[in-house]
Amino acid sequence: AQKVTQAQTEISVVEKEDVTLDCVYETRDTTYYLFWYKQPPSGELVFLIRRNSFDEQNEISGRYSWNFQKSTSSFNFTITASQVVDSAVYFCALRSSASKIIFGSGTRLSIRP
Amino acid sequence: GAVVSQHPSWVICKSGTSVKIECRSLDFQATTMFWYRQFPKQSLMLMATSNEGSKATYEQGVEKDKFLINHASLTLSTLTVTSAHPEDSSFYICSARDLREPTYGYTFGSGTRLTVV
């Protein structure tokens, strides 16, 4: 069975703080893909990153960075020097052999000025 | 990049009526599209996988007769909520798989907020 767990329901930090969103996944497939999406209040899903199971390199994109560790089945997302515009719901998602994407429950991030 | 257009963005309908939501891939052909439902402050739950030219595959617990899916062309999938009731009020989002972009692969529509009164 496929499963994505985002244990943090809500996080609130003050602007400029660093914040890490946790994601733990379960799958029996050896080939799979992990995603992070941002959902602002308007509702659309904004694609942030895709990582396949064979690429454990961490990635940095501006203030965003991702830490993929197969040993712990985790794919955590860190925002450095957070800004108010980062406030949104963030979803971690998993796609495996069935080709459909399964989403975690989401983490609501609030950045206070 | 790949664009998926979803219409309408919001709709209000009376209980008992049917509502059709369209999902179009604008610049690519999508043999597979996905329909999700999201209740307030909850996650996106996959409802069904829509395959061009064949019947949709529904997830467990989703009523096939209630949520009719038609994927008649490579660029259009429709979701019809039949005999809608207030409990069907939700945010519906479609996603299309773009085989031209293996790096991303999935493009989401902007969603449809359905309110049944």
Image: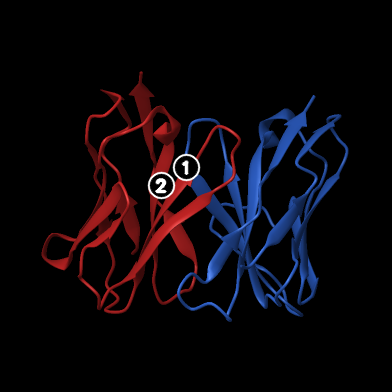
Chain colours: A red, B blue
Tell me the tag on residue B43: 1
- The image position of residue A57, as x and y in percent, is 20, 69
**Res B15 seen here:** yes
| Chain that bears disc 2 | A
Q: Is residue B103 above or below residue B14?
A: below
Q: Residue at x 63, y 50 (%)?
A: B93
- The image position of residue A90, as x and y in percent, is 40, 42
Q: Are marks 2 and 1 in contact (CB under 8 Å)?
A: yes
**Amino acid, disc 1:** Ser
- The image position of residue A65, as x and y in percent, is 26, 53
Q: Nearer the viewer, residue B94 or A65?
A: A65
Q: Residue at x 63, y 67 (%)?
A: B2
Both marks 2 and 1 on one chain: no
Q: Is residue B87 left or right of residue B13?
A: left
**Res B65 seen here:** no
Q: Which quadrant would the C terminus of chain B be assigned to in this image?
A: top right
Q: Is residue A33 above or below residue A49?
A: below
Tell me the tag on residue A91: 2
